[in-house]
Amino acid sequence: MKTIFQRIIDREIPAKIAHEDERCIAIHDVNPQAPVHVLVIPKSPIARVGAATADDSSTLGHLLLTAAAVAKKLGLAESGFRLVINNGQDGGETVPHLHVHLLGGRPLAWPPG
Ligand code: AMP
């Protein structure tokens, strides 16, 4: 059973794409929690960061570097931004395909709820 993100990667359902390369895709979240809310998703189907292995190290690094590059592209380099990875039930994970949330465009409270 494909996740919704795998279906987006496979072009079975549409998404607003902010960035794509051979290893990941970045899409605008359908339910944005900030003026900028982008999801950076690896094309390899890692379920969650807690399921990643040493073999995924390069992919994990690529996701963070890509998130920072997309933040810059979308004008957040000066104002700032937040990267979030939800893992498991208490972490608020709803889609079991690893994704980095990029949030910005407004001041973000800390600690998160
Ligand atoms: P998480 O709760 O960390 O698993 O995040 C899943 C995110 O995916 C949520 O912020 C959803 O709003 C978002 N989402 C779900 N379906 C789609 C979709 N088809 N296109 C873009 N974002 C989606």
Image (cartoon, rainbow, N blue to C red):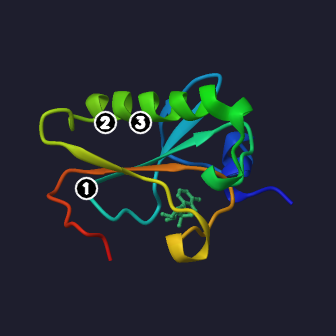
Q: Which residue shows up at 53% across the image and 27% down it?
A: 62
Q: Residue furthest top?
A: 22
Q: Which secondary structure, mark 3? A: helix
The residue singled out by tag 1 in the image is: 35
Instruction: Please indicate, yes or no, whether residue 48 appears anywhere in the rendered image.
Output: no
Look at the numbered discs 2 and 3 and tell me whether their residues touch, using CB distance below 8 Å. Answer: yes
Q: Which secondary structure, mark 1? A: loop
- Which callout, 1 or 3, points to the residue nearer the camera? 3
In the image, residue 46 sits, relative to residue 23, either above or below, namely below
The answer to which of marks 1 and 2 sits earlier in the sequence is 1
Q: Which mark is residue 67?
A: 3
Q: Which residue shows up at 18% across the image and 42% down it?
A: 80
> Relative to residue 75, is residue 16 drawn left or right?
right
Q: Position of residue 82 (x, y in %)?
A: 30, 50
Q: Could you tell me how far apart the alpha carbons at marks 1 and 3 are, in whole angstroms?
A: 16 Å
Q: Position of residue 6 (x, y in %)?
A: 73, 48
Identify the amino acid type marked 2: Ala
Identify the amino acid type marked 1: Pro
Quarter location, residue 67: top left
Q: Which mark is residue 71?
A: 2
Q: Could you tell me how far apart the alpha carbons at marks 1 and 2 are, in whole angstroms?
A: 12 Å
Mark 2: few/some/many CA within 10 Å (<14, 14-19, 20+): many
In the image, residue 51 sits, relative to residue 58, either above or below, namely below
Look at the numbered discs 1 and 2 and tell me whether their residues touch, using CB distance below 8 Å. Answer: no
Quarter placement of the N terminus: bottom right
The answer to which of marks 1 and 3 sits earlier in the sequence is 1
